[in-house]
């Protein structure tokens, strides 16, 4: 160090400003922060520019030369440090962005995985298979129904108390196709009985699976949307014995020969007499399955059939419940959670 260097406070200030600048550059966290530091150090009113204005206050040429050189060197090292830091940070920011926006399109192509039907679909299809094996045909009806098909034709006129048992979801349909307030989401598959009777000539041996809706809060055993399968047999001389025999044949075909069934008296407006049917497991325990009975004469009439000529039975039960029974699922909501870890097990 020369005498001049030692005696000049400006040189110290340049070194201090340079070191402080370099330290800030090294810890800058973003490209934007580097730009701000650049302005602070090298801008028109930046710290190095301010030091430059003090060159004029120096008295000798040597002093000016030494201070000028120190300023130039400081400006150069700061400029280089800024450029390096800017490149490093830009590269890091780009890498983060690329990772975030990464779309891996190769995964499924190299390892395609085979899916399978939902467990309710599986139960639905098995039920159809079993009934087809017993000589039934399969039909489906609309999910949005009218009051007439869902209630009226099923022997539940306007003020019938049984209506309140079907927590019904009404649509706000208003138009030429139906009276206001009479268009609803079907609460059971029984309306399809009427549609089938109206369209095909007996003898009828038909099952009608489908989605049904009730105004219910989901819990372990209920969902507001679930599935039923309806059965309808119309022929000459059909009796309750045919109903009991059909339920038992179905039970053994679906669950296996070690299962049996029973009927318990019950009430439905659309069947008379009516019964509840239960299935007994080989261990002796019972599963409540659904409702059934002999088709009520009023229902036959609503379907356009003469009760003096035709008789028949009907039954209906929950498909979701069948799937739950078969797989020992505790909470029915799990079946609709779309959690692949659950669904994959079946
Ligand atoms: N529809 C009835 C229900 O949802 C079940 C049923 C169908 C009962 C056919 C008798 C005959 O509860």
Image: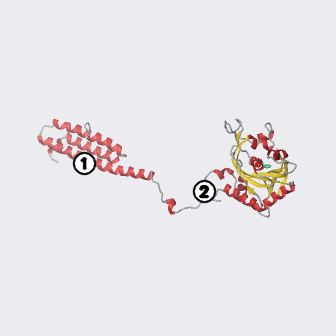
Marks 2 and 1, the one that precedes in the sequence: 1
Q: Nearer the viewer, residue 278 or 124?
A: 124
Secondary structure at badge 2 equals helix
Q: Position of residue 31 (x, y in %)?
A: 35, 46
Q: Is mark 2 within 8 Å of ligand 1?
A: no
In this picture, residue 161 sits left or right of residue 124: right
Packing grade of label 2 (10 A; few <14, some 14-19, many >=20) is: few
In this picture, residue 217 sits left or right of residue 341: right
Up the image or down, 84 lies above or below 45; here it is: below
Provide the residue designation for mark 2. Answer: 341
In this picture, residue 269 sits left or right of residue 89: right
Residue at position x 75%, y 59% from top? Answer: 131
Q: Nearer the viewer, residue 138 or 289?
A: 138
Up the image or down, 80 lies above or below 164; here it is: below
The residue at the far bottom in this view is 257
In this picture, residue 105 sits left or right of residue 314: left
Q: Position of residue 313 (x, y in %)?
A: 82, 52
Checking the image for residue 77, the label placed there is 1
Specify whether residue 268 is in view. no
Residue at position x 32%, y 46% from top? Answer: 25
Q: Position of residue 307 (x, y in %)?
A: 86, 48
Up the image or down, 6 lies above or below 278; here it is: above
* Circle 2 or circle 1, nearest the eye: 2
Specify whether residue 106 is in view. yes
Report which quarter residue 344 is drawn in.
bottom right
Secondary structure at badge 1 equals helix
């Amino acid at each position: 160090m020369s005498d001049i260097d030692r005696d000049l406070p400006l040189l110290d200030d340049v070194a201090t400003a340079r070191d402080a600048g370099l330290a800030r550059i090294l810890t800058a966290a973003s490209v934007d922060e580097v730009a701000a530091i650049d302005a602070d150090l090298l801008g028109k009113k930046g710290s190095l520019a301010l030091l430059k204005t003090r060159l004029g206050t120096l008295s000798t040429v040597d002093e000016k030369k030494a201070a000028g050189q120190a300023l130039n060197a400081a400006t150069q090292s700061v400029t280089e440090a800024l450029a390096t830091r800017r490149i490093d940070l830009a590269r890091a920011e780009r890498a983060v962005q690329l990772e975030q926006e990464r779309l891996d399109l190769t995964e499924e192509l190299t390892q395609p995985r085979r899916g399978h039907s939902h467990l309710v679909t599986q139960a639905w299809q098995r039920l159809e298979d079993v009934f087809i094996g017993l000589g039934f045909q399969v039909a489906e009806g609309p999910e949005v129904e009218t009051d007439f098909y869902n209630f009226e034709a099923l022997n539940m006129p306007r003020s019938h108390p049984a209506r309140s048992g079907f927590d019904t979801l009404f649509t706000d349909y208003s138009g030429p196709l139906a009276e206001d307030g009479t268009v609803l989401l079907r609460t059971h598959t029984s309306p399809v009985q009427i549609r089938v009777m109206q369209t095909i000539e007996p003898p009828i041996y038909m099952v009608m699976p489908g989605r049904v809706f009730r105004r219910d809060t989901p819990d372990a055993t209920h969902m507001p949307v679930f599935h039923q399968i309806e059965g309808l047999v119309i022929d000459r001389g059909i009796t309750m014995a045919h109903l009991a025999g059909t339920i038992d044949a179905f039970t053994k075909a679906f669950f296996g020969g070690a299962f049996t069934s029973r009927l318990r008296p019950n009430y439905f407006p659309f069947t008379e007499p009516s019964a509840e049917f239960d299935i007994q497991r080989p261990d002796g325990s019972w599963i409540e399955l659904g409702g059934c009975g002999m088709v009520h004469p009023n229902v036959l009439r609503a379907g356009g059939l003469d009760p003096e000529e035709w008789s028949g039975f009907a039954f209906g039960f929950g498909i979701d419940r069948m799937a739950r029974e078969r797989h020992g699922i505790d909470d029915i909501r799990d079946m609709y959670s779309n959690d692949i870890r659950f669904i994959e097990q079946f």
